[in-house]
Image (cartoon, rainbow, N blue to C red):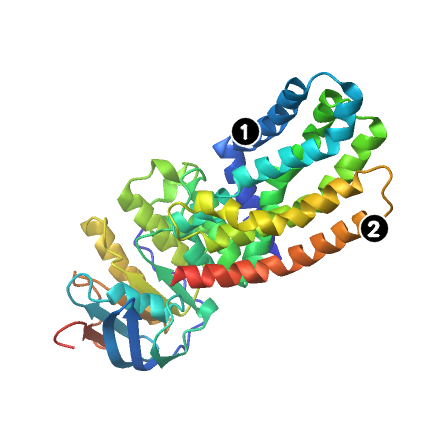
Amino acid sequence: MSAFRALIGRDLKLAFRAGGEALTLVLFFVMVAVIVPFAIGPDRPQLTRLAPGIVWIAAFLSMLLGLDRLFRNDDEDGSLTLLRHAGLPLEAVVAAKVIAHWLMTALPLLLATPVLALLLSMSWAQWGQTVLALLIGTPALVSFGALGAAVTVGLRRGGLIAPVLILPLSIPIMIFGVGMMDPLAGSGATLFLIALSLVVTAFSPFAAALALRVAGE
Amino acid sequence: MNQPLPVSEAFHPQLSVSGLTVRRGERLLFADLQFELRPGGVLLLRGPNGVGKSTLLLALAGIVRPDAGTIAGAERTELHLLNYQSGLKGRLTVSENLKFWQAMNGANGLTVAAALDAVGIGGLGVLEAGYLSSGQLRRLALARLLVSARPIWLLDEPSAALDAEGEALLGRLIDAHRGRGGIAVVATHHDLPLTDQAGVETLILGGAA
C-alpha cells in the first residue's frame, strides 16, 4: 500500500512543481462559462436552463485537454517500463495514476464550480446538484481517459487521437450527468450515473494495463 | 566511496533460457537462443549495434514477448532493468527519485543516503535531478539497483556516460552483487573491470552466434 501512496504522491508532486497545468484546465473550464452568456445573450432564465449542459461541456473539454499527460511523460522517460517490475501489479500502478490524475484535474474543477454557478445564474440547489453530478461522473471520465491514453501512448500524435477515441464512450456519462441535474428528473439518472462510474472505474485499470503491456512491446 | 557494500541475505537465482526466438516486426533477431546462469554468474552480450542485445534484455525483463522459447527464473519482482531510459524525473530531487523507486521496488537494500554514497553522488541528494550531468544521472540510476535488493540485474550499456572512475565503480557494484549470489546480464561494448573472470560468459549475437 505504501508503494501505491508513493506513486500518487510522486505524481502530485510532479504536477505541483510543473506548476500551472492544473490551473490551465481550471481557467479553460471557467472561460467556457464566461463566454457562453455572451454567445446566447443575457437571458437569465434561459441561462439557468442551459447551465447543466454548459457545465458538463466545459468539464468534459477541459478533462480531455489534460488527458495526454496521464502516461506520456512516464513513457518517454522510461518510468513506465520500470514500473512493470515494481512490487505493485501494473493494474494497481494504473489505478494510482488515475487517482492522482483525478485529484489534479477533476478536483480543481469541482472547486471552481461556484464561479460557474454565479456566471450561469444557477440557484444554490442547482449548484449542489452540479457538484454532486461532477463528483460522480468525473471518475468515469478520467477512467475512460486512462483507457484512451494507454491505447495511444505509443503514438506520437496520441494527444489528438485519444479524445476522439473516448468521446463516444463518454457520451453516456454526459447524458446521465446532465439528466441528473434536471430538477424534474427522478433518481433514475443518478443511479445510472453511479452505476456507470463504478463499473468504468473498476474495469479501466485492467483494460489500460493491458493496453500498456501491448504498447511496451 | 570504496567501502564494501553491506552483505545482507544471499540470493539463489537461477536464470535459464531455452529455444528463445524473438522477432521485431518482420525481422528475426535471434533464434533458438540457449543459456543458463547460476548464482554469481555474469553473461556479457556482445555484437554490433542493432543486433538485438537490448531486445534480448527486454525479453528477459518480460517486456517483449518472445515468439518461441522459455525464460525460467526471471520473476517480475526479482529483477532490475537498467537501460538508456533512466525513469528519473528532472523535477524531483535526487533523493526523492531514489525514495520513489525504493517505495515501488521494495526497501530491502541500502538506505537512500547509503546508496547515493555508494555511487559517489552522496552530496547531491537535495539537488533536482534535472541539474545532474548524464554521468551523474547514470550513477543515480545505478543507485536504484542498490536500494532494492533483487537477484537479477539486466544492464544495457551500463557504462555509457560513466568516466573511468565510474566504470571501476560499476565493476565493484557488479562484483558485490555477484558476491551475494546475484546474476547479471550485461549488454556492453566495453570490457567490464570485474575482479573474478571465472563465471563470466560471453554471448555474441548476430553472425557468429
Residue A59 drawn at (x, y percent): 64, 36
Query: Residue A161 at what x, y percent from top left?
Result: 46, 47
Residue located at (68% from left, 20% from top): A37
Query: With B100 as the anchor, is B179 left or right in this view?
Result: left
Q: Amino acid at mark 1?
A: Thr
Give the structural element (helix, strand or loop) at label 2.
Answer: helix
* Residue A24 marker: 1
- Give x and y (percent) for residue A1: 62, 57
The residue closer to the viewer here, B6 or A198, is A198
Mark 2 crowdedness (10 Å alpha carbons): few <14, some 14-19, many ≥20: few
Q: Which residue is mark 2?
A: A188
- The reply to whether discs 2 and 1 touch (Cβ–Cβ < 8 Å) is no
Q: Which picture quadrant has residue A116? A: top right
Determine the residue positioned at 74% across, 46% down.
A176
A183 with respect to B191 (left or right): right
Picture disc at residue A73: none
Nearest the eye: B21 or B95 = B21
Q: Which tag, 2 or 1, sits closer to the chain's start? A: 1
Q: Which of the two marks, 2 or 1, is nearer to us in this view?
A: 2
Residue nearest the viewer, comparing A188 with B160: A188
Query: Which residue lies at the image location 20% right of the left edge and 74% below the top edge?
Result: B203
Residue ID at (83%, 27%): A124
Q: Is residue B168 above or below residue B152?
A: above
Chain where mark 1 sits: A
Q: Amino acid at mark 2?
A: Gly
Q: Secondary structure at mark 1?
A: helix
Q: Residue furthest left?
A: B208
Q: CA distance from mark 2 to mark 1?
A: 34 Å
Residue B39 percent across, percent down from the top left: 35, 77
